[in-house]
Image (tube, grey):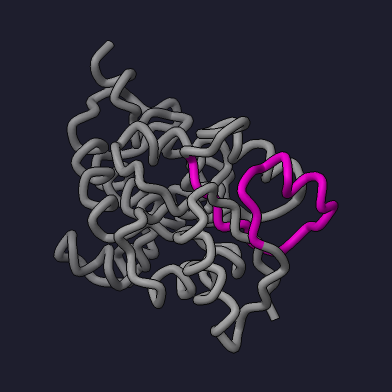
Amino acid sequence: MITVAVVDDHPVYRQGLAHAVDASAALNLECAVDSVEELERRGVTPNVVVLDLGLKGVSGADAVRRVCDLGATVLVVSAEGAQKDVVDAIGAGASGYLTKSSEPEEITNAIQVVAAGDTYVSPTLAAFLLRAAKADDRASPFALSDREREILALVAAGERDADIADQLFISVRTVRSHLDRIRDKTGRRRRADLTRLAVAEGIVPSEDARDA
């Protein structure tokens, strides 16, 4: 059973999301609160915290870092869907990102994905992460090829090997060969670590970095 906390300062949305979590047989709702500070006061450490970014008090990437410091996995579900918001949240430690337009079933599925140690980004947001990686021509310190950069961007977007193969018109075996080379070059093994590497190295750049 995956324990979950919901942190959102909009009462109606918080209650609706808490109900969706509570209704899932795979999830156990630990608490639903309106701020990171209240979560800290509760003294709980759920497996996954579903976190809004536009909170009163600690918010944005700082909220992600504070919750990660508690030892929980963070799935952001926010009204903010700009590229910079996604990249900053993942860079701060979030394992997944959805907008509040997502269906409850997608959110509860994403909770299970990130609880298993994978990353999850909605397909809509994934598309511009891939475009960002293609637009960024900075050399990688790990000497990644253009194809490896594309694959790393799609990993950061939460895509599975089969989905990456479909999008790039290559075989799953080829995707996995590229991933093996990426892991050998970077020393990162887990997909969550590869996601954070993509952000840190500018393979998935923020708007500010691209405009600089």
Nearest the camera: 119 or 13?
A: 13
Q: Residue furthest top?
A: 212
Q: Which residue lies furthest to the bottom in this view?
A: 25
* Coordinates of residue 66 in the picture (x, y in percent): 68, 37
Above or below, 34 against 122 in this view is above
Residue 51 highlighted magenta (yes or no): yes
Nearest the camera: 98 or 209?
A: 98
Residue that appears at 56% across and 69% down? 18
Residue that appears at 70% across and 81% down? 1
In the image, is 36 to the left or to the right of 77?
right
Above or below, 171 against 14 in this view is below
Above or below, 117 against 64 in this view is below
The magenta stretch is: 32-53
Residue that appears at 59% across and 88% down? 25
Above or below, 56 against 191 in this view is above
Q: Quadrant of residue 134?
A: top left
